[in-house]
Amino acid sequence: MDGALDPDSSGYEQSAPKNEKKFDATMAAKWGILGWLSNQGSTPLVDVFTHSSADMVDFHVATVTQALQ
């Protein structure tokens, strides 16, 4: 790579836990407020915020690490 930031090349293999339920846009489009709070034993709205927060931390750590090299 020519010095550009590639957030996927942090060296860590990222994968979802095997027991994590995956949803697609077609399913989510049919949810009401309660569906976003609790759906099939999971909490999709909470999951969105916690996963996005972790993704931002990964991105910032990769950016700082690259800047310091």
Image (cartoon, grey):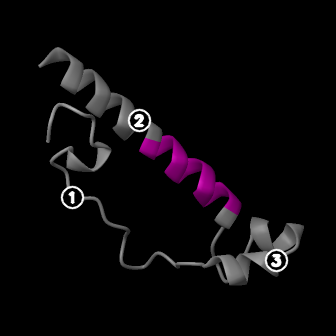
Q: Residue at x 52, y 79 (%)?
A: 21
Which amino acid type is shown beneath numbered disc 2? Val
Dot 2: few (<14), some (14–19), or many (≥20) neighbours within 10 Å?
few
Q: CA distance from mark 1 to mark 3?
A: 32 Å
The magenta-colored residue range is 45-55
Task: Indicate whether residue 57 is drawn in magenta.
Answer: no
Dot 3: few (<14), some (14–19), or many (≥20) neighbours within 10 Å?
few
Task: Indicate whether residue 51 is drawn in magenta.
Answer: yes
16 and 5: which is toward the camera: 5
Residue 24 point in image, percent of width and height: 61, 79
- Which residue is tagged 2? 57
- Which residue is tagged 3? 31
8 and 38: which is toward the camera: 8
Which amino acid type is shown beneath numbered disc 1? Glu
- Residue 53 horizontal side relative to residue 42, left or right: left
**In the image, which disc is placed on residue 13?**
1
Residue 62 point in image, percent of width and height: 27, 33
Q: Residue at x 28, y 59 (%)?
A: 14
Q: Secondary structure at mark 1?
A: loop
